[in-house]
Image (tube, rainbow, N blue to C red):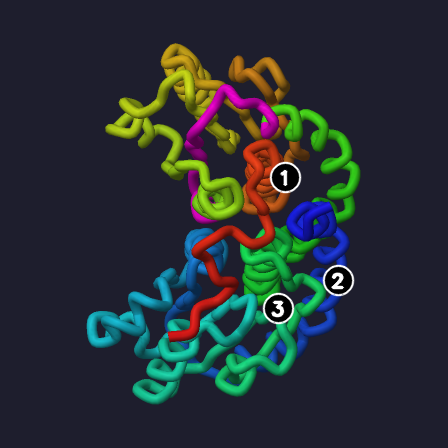
Amino acid sequence: MYKTENEIMDQYRALEQTFQYFMSRASDIKEFVGHHSFNSLTFIGAGSGYCICRSSETSAKMRLGIPAHAIPAGDLMLNFPHYEKVIRDTLLVVPSRSGSTSEVIRAVQDSKDKYGVPCISICAKQDAEISHLADLNLEIPWAFDESVCQTRTVTNFYAANLLLIGILGNDSMLIDEIRECISAGEGYMAQYIDSLKEIGQSSKWEKVVVLADSELQGIAGEGALAFKEIARIPSNSYHLLDVRHGPMVLVDDKTLVIMACSPYGHDYQKGLVADIKNKGARVITVGTQPAAEFGADVHVAVSDYDNYGVMGIPFIFVPQAIAYYKAVLNGINPDFPEGLQPWIKL
């Protein structure tokens, strides 16, 4: 078994620990926020971390009703003066696997030096460099991925950011649904792993499109990134209906489409699936709807959560697992893809 497979299949065990840890730190988080003044939230990350930040930006706007931003750490580091009005009077939230990626460290350091903004870090390593910069450091080392490509770590970061938002907003329903989702995770993986393995081991598709809206769009971007990094497969992510605005010309019988279904606009989504299948592509839908709702080739059913963002936790497992099995089929070591480093030191 490769480390990547072990880390994918271990993610719900790690999520249980992450959930308990965040609940144990809830009073610390609330106390910290109560002692700092800020007008917005700014999520900073690199690579997979930035994909998670994009989802968190949407979640924060929707659930807390305050301005929120997601900025790639490298962009902020290079172009810091451009972001003055964003960074001033914000609260930084920084998920980082290693806590030592240069772009992340320098972006946070510049933000604190220039404006003295408070910072919460969420790190998968203990006593990392970011922990000495952050004003509140939340450490989840059980989520650390030894593989170059992140799987377990990003799922835990996604849940951690959502838990943080739930704590800040005193949203007990959101927190309860995250708990329910995590508790059901092992059974969910066992139910679908064989189907996802079969799809991954198919040689009929050579590129991937991942579709999602709202809070799931960022983590869908991470799903597309997983195919590039783990399996070296060309992949892209788009909003659901936006795929018709240009990208559809590249969809063909060599394309696998993974679609996170919205709880709204069923007829529009059904029409989209039909259009994609008419191009010859294979379609996997993930959602709360019945299997026959959209006419996909494969449907992965998830629980019906009132908080749509919770669906991102089971959703990301689908591209992760398929990417892993595609890599194995193609004779690629998913743990150490050539040309990639687990974190960047400039």
Return the x and y of residue 177 as percentages of the image width and height: 68, 48
x 52%, y 84%: residue? 135
Q: Residue furthest top?
A: 278
Judged left or right of residue 246, residue 253 is right
Q: Position of residue 200 (x, y in %)?
A: 59, 29
7 relative position to 293: left or right: right
Q: Which residue is mark 3?
A: 124
Q: Are marks 1 and 3 in contact (CB under 8 Å)?
A: no
Q: Is residue 178 visible?
A: no
Identify the residue under disc 2. Answer: 17
Q: Which comes before the other along the chain, label 3 or label 2? A: 2
Q: How many marks?
A: 3
> Between tags 3 and 2, which lies in front?
3
The CA span between labels 3 and 2 is 12 Å
Q: Residue at x 32, y 74 (%)?
A: 87
Q: Residue at x 75, y 30 (%)?
A: 191
Asked if disc 3 and disc 2 are in contact, CB closer than 8 Å, the reply is no
Q: Which residue range is magenta in the image?
A: 200-219
Residue corresponding to mark 1: 305
Circle 3: residue type: Ala
Residue 72's place in the image compared with 277, above or below, is below
Residue 197 in the image, given as x and y percentages of width and height:
66, 30
Looking at the picture, tell me which residue is in the foreground, 72 or 102.
102
CA–CA distance in space, label 1 to label 3: 27 Å
Q: Is residue 250 visible?
A: yes
Looking at the image, is mark 1 or mark 3 nearer the viewer? 3
Kind of residue at disc 1: Tyr
| Circle 2 SS class | helix
Give the vertical position of 91 relative to 75 (above or below). below
Say whether residue 57 is magenta: no
Label 2 CA crowd tier, 10 Å (few <14, some 14–19, many 20+): some
